[in-house]
Image (cartoon, rainbow, N blue to C red):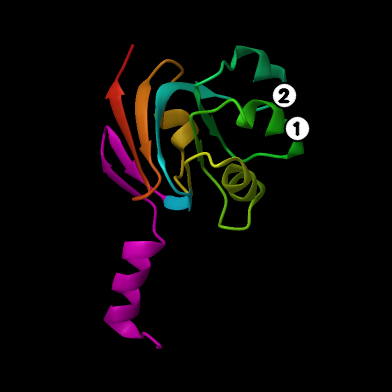
Protein backbone atom coordinates (compact mmCIF):
# COMPACT_ATOMS: atom_id res chain seq x y z
CA UNK A 1 0.00 0.00 0.00
CA UNK A 2 1.27 3.45 -0.89
CA UNK A 3 -0.07 6.49 0.91
CA UNK A 4 0.09 9.99 -0.54
CA UNK A 5 -1.09 13.44 0.42
CA UNK A 6 -3.34 13.74 3.44
CA UNK A 7 -3.37 9.96 4.01
CA UNK A 8 0.44 9.87 4.17
CA UNK A 9 0.52 12.86 6.53
CA UNK A 10 -2.05 11.30 8.87
CA UNK A 11 -0.14 8.00 8.90
CA UNK A 12 3.15 9.77 9.66
CA UNK A 13 1.58 11.84 12.45
CA UNK A 14 -0.02 8.77 14.01
CA UNK A 15 2.99 6.46 13.86
CA UNK A 16 6.21 8.44 13.48
CA UNK A 17 5.86 11.91 14.90
CA UNK A 18 6.79 12.45 18.54
CA UNK A 19 4.17 14.56 20.25
CA UNK A 20 3.79 16.44 23.45
CA UNK A 21 0.28 15.52 24.55
CA UNK A 22 0.36 17.98 27.47
CA UNK A 23 2.81 19.15 30.13
CA UNK A 24 2.78 15.74 31.83
CA UNK A 25 2.40 13.35 28.91
CA UNK A 26 4.71 12.84 25.95
CA UNK A 27 4.41 10.60 22.90
CA UNK A 28 7.27 8.96 21.06
CA UNK A 29 7.90 5.67 19.26
CA UNK A 30 7.78 2.31 20.96
CA UNK A 31 11.16 0.60 20.68
CA UNK A 32 10.54 -2.28 23.11
CA UNK A 33 7.06 -3.16 24.42
CA UNK A 34 5.89 -3.21 28.00
CA UNK A 35 5.06 -0.85 30.84
CA UNK A 36 7.53 0.38 33.43
CA UNK A 37 7.27 2.78 36.32
CA UNK A 38 9.91 4.44 38.44
CA UNK A 39 11.86 7.56 39.31
CA UNK A 40 13.58 9.39 36.49
CA UNK A 41 17.34 9.62 36.32
CA UNK A 42 18.59 11.75 33.44
CA UNK A 43 21.98 10.35 32.44
CA UNK A 44 23.93 12.26 29.81
CA UNK A 45 27.27 10.47 30.13
CA UNK A 46 29.42 7.90 31.90
CA UNK A 47 30.27 10.37 34.66
CA UNK A 48 26.61 10.24 35.83
CA UNK A 49 26.26 6.44 36.00
CA UNK A 50 26.82 6.44 39.78
CA UNK A 51 23.49 8.20 40.40
CA UNK A 52 21.51 5.41 38.69
CA UNK A 53 19.84 2.80 40.93
CA UNK A 54 18.02 -0.48 40.27
CA UNK A 55 14.44 0.23 39.12
CA UNK A 56 15.03 3.83 38.00
CA UNK A 57 13.79 5.02 34.61
CA UNK A 58 16.76 5.84 32.40
CA UNK A 59 16.30 9.06 30.41
CA UNK A 60 19.07 9.82 27.91
CA UNK A 61 19.73 11.51 24.62
CA UNK A 62 20.85 8.16 23.25
CA UNK A 63 22.94 5.24 24.47
CA UNK A 64 26.20 3.54 23.55
CA UNK A 65 27.77 0.26 24.69
CA UNK A 66 29.01 2.03 27.85
CA UNK A 67 25.38 2.41 28.98
CA UNK A 68 24.63 -1.34 29.05
CA UNK A 69 25.70 -1.61 32.71
CA UNK A 70 22.93 0.75 33.83
CA UNK A 71 20.41 -0.13 31.11
CA UNK A 72 19.93 -3.61 32.54
CA UNK A 73 18.99 -2.09 35.94
CA UNK A 74 16.28 0.16 34.45
CA UNK A 75 12.54 -0.38 34.87
CA UNK A 76 12.12 1.52 31.57
CA UNK A 77 14.16 3.61 29.15
CA UNK A 78 13.29 6.87 27.39
CA UNK A 79 15.53 8.45 24.74
CA UNK A 80 15.43 11.63 22.69
CA UNK A 81 16.96 10.05 19.63
CA UNK A 82 16.77 6.66 18.06
CA UNK A 83 14.77 4.46 15.80
CA UNK A 84 14.01 0.76 15.89
CA UNK A 85 17.60 -0.19 15.03
CA UNK A 86 19.35 2.27 17.38
CA UNK A 87 21.53 0.94 20.20
CA UNK A 88 18.98 1.92 22.86
CA UNK A 89 16.20 0.09 21.01
CA UNK A 90 18.10 -3.12 20.29
CA UNK A 91 19.52 -3.46 23.82
CA UNK A 92 16.19 -2.67 25.51
CA UNK A 93 14.53 -5.42 23.44
CA UNK A 94 17.32 -7.87 24.31
CA UNK A 95 16.77 -7.20 28.03
CA UNK A 96 12.96 -7.02 27.74
CA UNK A 97 12.88 -3.46 29.11
CA UNK A 98 10.08 -1.11 28.00
CA UNK A 99 11.56 1.65 25.83
CA UNK A 100 10.21 4.75 24.11
CA UNK A 101 12.41 6.76 21.73
CA UNK A 102 12.14 9.89 19.62
CA UNK A 103 10.87 12.46 22.12
CA UNK A 104 12.66 15.76 21.41
CA UNK A 105 14.04 17.60 24.46
CA UNK A 106 12.92 14.85 26.87
CA UNK A 107 16.16 15.23 28.88
CA UNK A 108 15.05 18.80 29.70
CA UNK A 109 11.34 18.00 30.13
CA UNK A 110 11.85 15.23 32.70
CA UNK A 111 13.82 15.87 35.89
CA UNK A 112 15.63 13.56 38.29
CA UNK A 113 13.15 12.24 40.83
CA UNK A 114 10.00 12.60 38.69
CA UNK A 115 7.83 9.50 39.09
CA UNK A 116 6.85 8.38 35.59
CA UNK A 117 5.02 5.61 33.84
CA UNK A 118 6.44 4.48 30.51
CA UNK A 119 3.80 2.74 28.42
CA UNK A 120 5.96 1.48 25.59
CA UNK A 121 3.01 -0.43 24.12
CA UNK A 122 1.53 2.96 23.19
CA UNK A 123 4.73 5.04 23.09
CA UNK A 124 3.58 7.27 25.96
CA UNK A 125 5.59 8.65 28.88
CA UNK A 126 3.45 10.14 31.65
CA UNK A 127 4.61 12.12 34.70
CA UNK A 128 2.69 10.76 37.68
CA UNK A 129 4.34 12.84 40.39
CA UNK A 130 6.96 15.58 40.67
CA UNK A 131 9.23 15.71 43.74
Residue 73 lies in quadrant: top right
| Residue under the point 52% across and 39% down | 97
Q: Is residue 80 above or below residue 83?
A: above
Describe the element under mark 2 as helix, strand or loop: helix
| Residue under the point 32% across and 83% down | 5
Closer mark to the observer between disc 1 and disc 2:
1
User: Mark 1 and mark 2: span between their CA atoms?
Assistant: 7 Å
Mark 1 highlights which residue? 66
Give the position of the C terminus as an image quadrant: top left
Residue 108 appears at what percent x and percent y? 46, 29
Q: Which mark is residue 116?
A: none
Residues packed near mark 2 inside 10 Å, few (<14), some (14 to 19) or many (20 plus): few
Residue 17: within the magenta? yes
Residue 32 appears at what percent x and percent y? 50, 49
Residue 88: within the magenta? no
Mark 2 highlights which residue? 46
Residue 60 appears at what percent x and percent y? 56, 34
Q: Which residues are magenta?
A: 1-28
Q: Is residue 115 above or below residue 102?
A: above
Is residue 112 toward the left or the right of residue 19 in the image? right
Tag 1 and tag 2, C-beta contact below 8 Å: yes
Q: Is residue 114 above or below residue 126?
A: above
Describe the element under mark 1 as helix, strand or loop: helix
Residue 119 lies in quadrant: top left
Amino acid sequence: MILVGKDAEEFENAYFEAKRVDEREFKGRSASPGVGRGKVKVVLGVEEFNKFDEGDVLVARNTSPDFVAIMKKASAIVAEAGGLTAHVSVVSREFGIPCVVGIPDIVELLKDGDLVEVDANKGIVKILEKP
